[in-house]
Image: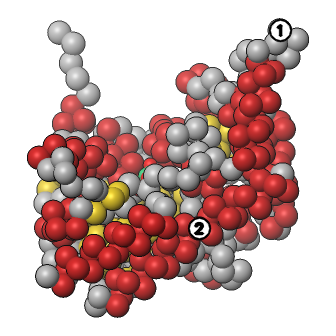
Amino acid sequence: MIRINEHFLKLQASYLFSDIAKRVAAFQQAHPERSIIKLGIGDVTHALPPACVAAFHRAIDEMADDATFRGYGPEQGYPFLREKIAETDFQSRGADIAADEIFVSDGSKCDTGNIQEIFSTGARIAIPDPVYPVYLDTNVMAGRTEKNRNGRYDGIVYMEGTAENGFVPELPREPVDLIYLCYPNNPTGATIDKAGLARWVDWARDHRALILFDAAYEAFVRDDGLPKSIFEIEGAREVAIEFRSFSKTAGFTGTRCAFTVVPKSLMAWDADGKAHSVHALWQRRQSTKFNGVSYPVQQAAAAVYTAEGRTQTTALINAYLENAALIRMKMQELGYACVGGENSPYIWINGKKNSWAFFDELLEKAGVVCTPGAGFGTCGENYIRISAFNSRENVQEALARIASALAG
Ligand code: MLT
């Protein structure tokens, strides 16, 4: 008799964004005449930058000719892309990262979800609350938790983000081995400065812990005082892995390209206390389970680093940041305390009521989709997240509708 992995039974019935999509679809079916504006899932709406599109086309033409056709590529990504990433995203900012420490992939969701496989099932995990659900769910699937009780899993150390700490959790007070951090933060939009991040790096060094640093939203950082990479912090090469994505940087949510940085100096230990290279483990895992990102997609991603690509992606992100500023301003004007929306595409709003009730109210009265904060953890209760990923017209229309719905 084939048995299931019973750890899956501990999960919530469905993934947060699938759940929301179902509710929105049901509402639309019941009210086909209503126009709905989606500011829920952080999915980009603007077209790919022209420099990426041109590179994509050129690469497709190469694939159409026997002389330039390519089959399997290197699992870790083509050198032309890894070298550009290392130079531009890291070395130019004083972060000592080499091209062969970069693993190109098809998304940060997969990488942040898969990375836990290379660590002990007994590893003690510290996860922020609120949090991007992938970090938590993948550890539940792997059997690192007990049952969910009142919205929390026994076996996880939750690091609480609250209005009091500005949604930047305190350092753990108990021993943990693997720490998930995300800045600029999804879902709260909170940021961390270099001194704040240095405290985490020092803590990890002192405790032989490892930080999984999700920097998928680094392109939204406009404040020079904020780090874009954990590797800008001294000592991080010994304790951190970083996840980056072209999804939000260059509109690649549907195109799929990301990368993970695993320094060669990063070690983790076996039961006998012997040190092992985490880079070698991840390379082993990826070369077994992954066959690389398609050549045209990697060429499109490499175009982000050309002069035109940089200008175009900056303009793209500026447009979303301007939306974020409008959302934050309007919600504050309406009397709601907000975090994020600066150096981040997400605005985290204290709705002062049950977050699913606020979600329903905005959907029913304004036809606007947000994300209920409770979906990101118990500390998200009473909050909602509004995303800036949409056209200016839709954002303005959504804000006007929200203002009149909440006034009425
Ligand atoms: C979100 O809305 O939190 C993101 O779009 C999720 C993701 O990038 O997978």
**Which amino acid type is shown beneath numbered disc 1?**
Asp
Q: Which residue is mark 2?
A: 319
Q: Name the quadrant of the N terminus.
A: top left
Say which of 44 and 209 sits in front: 44
Q: Which residue is mark 1?
A: 66
Q: Residues within 10 Å of mark 2 (few under 14, many from 20)?
A: some
Q: Name the quadrant of the C terminus.
A: bottom left
SS for dot 1: loop
Query: Residue 281, percent across and down?
Result: 62, 35
Q: Is residue 338 left or right of residue 318?
A: left
Query: Residue 363, percent across and down?
Result: 20, 62
Say which of 379 and 1 sits in front: 379
SS for dot 2: helix
Q: Which mark is residue 57?
A: none
Q: Residues within 10 Å of mark 1 (few under 14, many from 20)?
A: few
Whether residue 323 is situated above or below residue 211 in the rendered picture: below
Residue located 27% across and 80% down the image? 403
Location of residue 143 by image quarter: top left
Q: CA distance from mark 2 to mark 1?
A: 41 Å
Q: Is residue 193 left or right of residue 21?
A: right
Residue located 68% across and 34% down the image? 297
Q: Earlier in the sequence, mark 2 or mark 1?
A: 1
Q: Can residue 113 be seen in this snapshot?
A: yes
Residue located 16% across and 43% down the image? 29
Residue located 85% across and 17% down the image? 68
Say which of 394 and 375 sits in front: 394
Whether residue 223 is situated above or below residue 217 in the rendered picture: below
Query: Residue 144, percent across and down?
Result: 33, 45
**Which amino acid type is shown beneath numbered disc 2?**
Ala
